[in-house]
Image (spheres, helix red, strand yellow):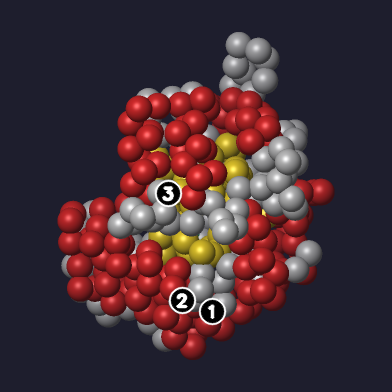
Amino acid sequence: MIVPFGTRLRAAMVERGPLCVGIDPHAHLLQAWGLPDDPSGLEKFTFTVIEALAGQVAMFKPQSAFFERFGSAGVAVLERAIPAARSAGALVLLDAKRGDIGSTMAGYASAYLSKDAPMACDALTVSPYLGFGSLQPAFDEARIAGAGVFVLALTSNPEAPALQSARTADGATVAGSVLDGLYKLNEGAEDLGSFGAVVGATIGSTDEDLDICGPLLAPGLGAQGATAESLAKIFGPALHNVVPNMSREILAQGPSVQALRDATAKANDTLGPVLGY
Ligand SMILES: O=c1ccn([C@@H]2O[C@H](COP(=O)(O)O)[C@@H](O)[C@H]2O)c(=O)[nH]1
């Protein structure tokens, strides 16, 4: 039986706390961990994080860019890391921000969401800027596979509002039309749907309706300056559906496994009660 991503994500958040830890092997982090800036360093870093934290996080979010920078050798590390993290019990959201015309989007969906793909993940981040409807192949594949899709809506970077607050032809904002599309996709889901939005924890506040009945991935905590209080201000009644993400803030504690675990436990202890876990 296929259990939808939203159901699996809620269960993981209840069991292990809401935190999603990013696996972002920046060059400066490899150096700080005393690792070479090459595929062997990438592999050691990635598998240390997985082994240290798989039992403590709801989800990992590997950042594809930091694997791709090593070419095929880096992608091969990612290809081994995804099933390793899933077998160790964590969900995996690949942060690759894919988005293309529908026929090509079907290729990305098959690469990352279809059940038997070598890089099959639990969920994928996608970009709606070729039109929300162009993402339909990813939504279709996710439904078949019991996977999830996170669509960029109100991103954490300062350049975002110039585009995402702009009005579309029907008068809604770009972000608002993405959120509305996600709400419709999640209709009929029990508790938490499988179609999520990315809403930065740094945005301060928003007039948009964040009640999409799906998960709200909130990057921007820690290194980008947002805090638990930021989440309370932004998400209001949707707080229980927020999946807070931290990458550098946690990863900077390595390579000590105990320090990684302590930082993760502290983040879950701080954020969990704010989000109702
Ligand atoms: O709006 C967005 C969307 C994605 N991200 C990604 O999240 C992590 C954040 O890393 P930190 O080290 O915790 O700042 C990174 O992979 C970004 O690409 C985001 O920050 N904002």
SS class of the residue under badge 1?
loop
The residue at which mark 1 appears reads as 55
Q: Secondary structure at mark 2?
A: loop
How many residues crowd mark 3 within 10 Å: few (<14), some (14–19), many (20+)?
Answer: many
| Disc 2 from disc 1: Cα separation | 7 Å
Q: Quadrant of the N terminus?
A: bottom right
Residue at image mark 3: 113
Q: Which of the two discs, 2 and 1, sits closer to the camera?
A: 2
Q: Label 2, on which residue? A: 88
Helix, strand or loop at disc 3?
loop
Residue 160 image offset from top left, x and y in percent: 52, 35
Q: Position of residue 215 (x, y in %)?
A: 64, 50
Residue at 29% x, 61% y: name it. Answer: 79
Give me the disc on residue 236. Answer: none
Answer whether residue 201 is visible to the viewer in this image: no
The reply to whether discs 2 and 1 touch (Cβ–Cβ < 8 Å) is yes
Amino acid carrying mark 1 in the image: Gly
Q: Do residues under tags 3 and 2 come within 8 Å of each other at their CB atoms?
A: no
Earlier sequence position, callout 2 versus callout 1: 1
Q: Which class describes the residues within 10 Å of circle 2: few (<14), some (14-19), or many (20+)?
A: few
